[in-house]
Image (cartoon, rainbow, N blue to C red):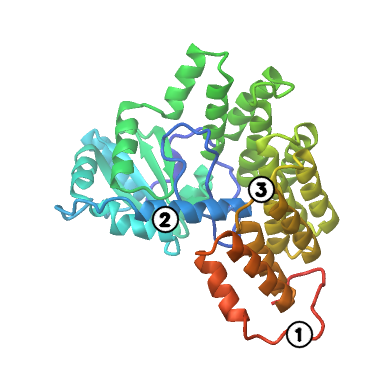
Amino acid sequence: MTSAPFFKFTSSVPRSSPPALIVPLALIVPLALIVPLALTSLACSTAPVGPRDVDDGVAQRRAAHAHAAPDRTAVGIRWFEGGLDAAREEARSQGKSLFVFVSTVWCGPCKRMKESAFLDGALARRVNDAFVPVMVDGDVGEGKALCESLRINSYPTMLFFEPRGIEIDRAFGFHDAAQMQRVIADMLADRNTVADLRRRVEATPASLALRQSLGLRLALRGDTAEAEKELEMVIRADPENAQGQAAQAMFTMGRYVHFLKTRDFDAAILHLGQLLSRFPASAPAREAAIDLVRLRMMRGQRDLAIAALEAMIAGQPAEAQRYVDAAQAVRQHGLPLGRAVEWLTHAATLRGDAVPLFLLGQVHEQQNDIPAAIAAYRKALERAPNDGASKQALGRLEGATPPKTPVRGSGTVL
């Protein structure tokens, strides 16, 4: 018997949504401004993101491993085995909500949740009592169709539906058992959901922060038209970024609406470029520049990629992290390593920790300039004598014979 079509799941996302943009595995971490519902955890993604997302994801992975071990006093969640459409009918017949866990075989955070949070006894009992839970693979069959329909491009994604098939909301990324308990409590109470945010915005229409959060949440779940409407209202209400909201809304529009969801790269470049031009000193301008580098490099526009990094640095020339971010973008995208050396060297004069010097050592290694790399690692150790990474790098290179002619080309030396 052929399963029923997926359009029976009610969502405001157009059914004609294009398929997910497949790019190399990366980590996606949305903005910190999002309300607490489940959007700041580690995830895998099929959508392009910047290098800072990867760095932040590593830190969050470490934090996730630090949580207490789950209570494994039960077998675990009783996942429905009959497929997605049958699970929907089962939820409707039982009057239960539907919990859809969308993962892939290559998603590390998905696997960790299956091996930890979903074996927690208390969580399993709560899920089994309140939901019909079902797992789907986002890469194949009905799971792939669901992802295309609902614009899902990061894993794990957790979908929650009312018994009649109307979507309550979504959660993204790795969650331990305690975090999942909070997510489920919010879903069942319709608290901190998109619907709840809508009600709060209606009650306090002058709150740009609330409207900002709503716009981002809508964008992340693929409701791009409504997201644009909310974000445009924020931009119009804060034209000079006096409240710090316009720049954030422009960034959300560029990255989450157009870059990651609609894949309208021209629109993404327009919004991110306007942000970098109008509010270069703002915090979102840093992330906008990194996204612009990726977009420009996708089109082979190396000079424009470098120009975005230069504009980002010029916006806050005394902010060391901007130089570090720019140097990391250079390394990631094979841009001229000489610029990374220049920017990391200057960053080391603006901040007193060892990070810029350690990264400088790595760049010199990419250039095959071993003496310069050794010198950078030694300086890093002067600032942080117990830094294991610098010690290891220095020990590895101390006996190396420097090449006669260091490579100072425009790209990364493998």
Q: Residue, x 54% and y 71% (percent of image)?
A: 391
Please tell me which residue lies in front, 389 or 196. 389
Say which residue label 3 marks. 321
Q: Looking at the picture, how far across and down is residue 123, in whole percent?
A: 23, 45
User: Is residue 88 shown left or right of residue 213?
Assistant: left
Q: Residue, x 80% and y 48% (percent of image)?
A: 310
Q: CA distance from mark 1 to mark 3?
A: 31 Å
Quick one: SS at disc 2? Answer: helix
Name the residue type under label 1.
Pro
For marks 3 and 2, the one nearer the N-term is: 2
Name the residue type under label 2.
Arg
Say which residue label 2 marks. 62
Please tell me which residue lies in front, 60 or 139. 60
Say which residue label 1 marks. 403
Name the residue type under label 3.
Gln
Q: Foreground mark, 2 or 1? A: 1
Q: Quadrant of the C terminus?
A: bottom right
User: Is residue 273 shown left or right of residue 45?
Assistant: right
Q: Which residue is outermost to the right?
A: 303
Quarter occupied by residue 37 = top left
